[in-house]
Image (cartoon, coloured by chain):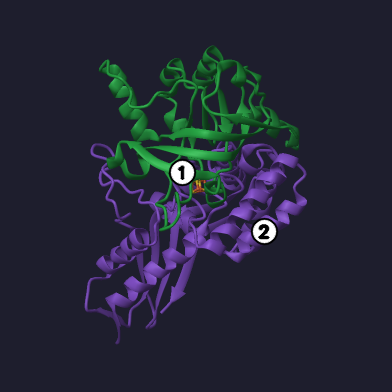
Amino acid sequence: MREIKAELIKDNVRDLFLHASSFIGEDIYNKLKERYEAEESPVGKSVLRQIIENNEIAAREKLAICQDTGMAVLFIELGQEVMIVEGDLNEAINQGVREAYVDGYLRKSIVDDPVFDRKNTRDNTPAVTYIDIVPGDKVKITITAKGFGSENMSRIKMLKPADGAAGVRDFVIKTAVEAGPNPCPPIIVGVGIGGTMEKAAVLSKKALLRTVGEHNADPRYAKLEDEILEEINKSGVGPAGLGGRTTALAVNINYYPTHIAGLPVAVNICCHASRHAEITI
Amino acid sequence: MEKVISITTPVTTSQVQELRAGDNVLITGNIYTGRDAAHKRLIELLADGKELPIDLNGQFIYYVGPSPAKPGHVVGSAGPTTSYRMEPYTPTLLKLGLKGMIGKGALSKEVVEAMKENGAVYFGAVGGAAALISKAIKKAEVVCYEDLGAEAIHKFYVEKFPVTVVIDSKGNNLYETEPQKYKLP
Ligand code: SF4
């Protein structure tokens, strides 16, 4: 057994959120620059320039890339040979989030009760946490600060098995294009296919965390990703929805076995400000 | 699309009616902020027959909930939030003299009709360009609803705050016209 102090988890969670809020991933930054060069629409180009400049200012001055610093979502892969000591794992995670948002001047956007009270918790907790037990003696922490302009444009649908690849393609394209200007395009499209309803949704969230430019290992799914991306970019929605060739930067699909009677598909949309980070302890 | 127009708040109806979808505008002067929760309170006050804590005549509302200011800064990052969530409240405020909204994303037909009737425009700021935009905000103070945190109504003094007219007072709408130009079969 390897012992890991809860405090170490807390410190890492805090540092990951602080980092991700100001520093956009190099994959996204480079893709934005590539699209800026390629963009045909003058307005679209100007929007991309502002987004690139914004990322540079945020990194240089350690400012929040976007004022919506999101809801904290964490995926923890906990090695089964690890014992968390001197504290409670979930509390350590929430304390890390609290310290990042309160001490790091990030916006607190969480309300305690979704329907009735809607009172701000004032420290951006609780986080949404998924814990997987995996072999080994390490802990991998992956975080994302998920903005809701794009989260609100996400959709899930229980397709029929007969709908097949064409059904998946149509649903993903429709969701991304109908979102229009609302999710701050250019967007990243996370797609979860298979499992159960909630499994598909979790897969789609995880798909957003993949490095832009990487594909699904299965060539059939990789091809589907490319086809869907091309179609979304044909829509003309463009940067900020003001017209152009760059509506999405990536389409990432994750899949899982499913039931003989079903084909669940979840589409989780993220804006260009896709803030995520990971560390293995 | 090339034209850049400077405008100072408060504005008159005729000034606003001259603006066309596609115009790039630099706003200088005071603007108010407001999101869902603040709008809800304003409308509740009106329903009770009470006066609003801010005078909307000739003003613009910026749909934003800024992040907290770091020490030595006027404001934190401050990009636009998605506008459709404020739709239920907007026609009422337009009747009270509100001349424009700054946000991102589409607006309903009802709101566009109310903009046409009252002579108002909808400006788009670039969503997610929040650190960049914050540089144009020179002063910030909370006017009311401090308990709402980021959702409190702030008064910003802005200089050359960069926006684009997305929907003008005639109802011309860039979100409808521009993507069509780049749509491929
Ligand atoms: S959708 Fe993303 S970029 Fe747009 S306001 Fe929300 S967090 Fe910021």
Q: Which percent across, then down, holds residue A176?
A: 57, 42
In front here: A202 or B11?
B11
Q: Which chain hosts label 2?
A: A
Q: Colour of chain A?
A: purple
Image quarter in which the N terminus of chain B is found: top right
Identify whether B89 is placed above or below A130: above
Q: Residue at x 56, y 16 (%)?
A: B13
What amino acid type is highlighted by mark number 2?
Answer: Lys
Secondary structure under badge 1?
Answer: strand
In front here: B119 or A137?
B119
Q: Which chain appears green?
A: B
Q: Which mark is residue A169?
A: none
- 10 Å neighbourhood of mark 2: few (<14), some, or many (≥20)? some
Residue wearing tag 2 = A31
Residue wearing tag 1 = B139
Q: Is residue A259 visible?
A: no
What amino acid type is highlighted by mark number 1?
Answer: Lys
Q: Which percent across, then down, holds residue A40?
A: 77, 44
- Left or right, A148 with respect to A55, comes to left
Q: Residue at x 36, y 59 (%)?
A: A101
- Left or right, B93 with respect to B114, comes to left
- Left or right, A235 with respect to B114, comes to right
Secondary structure under badge 2?
Answer: helix
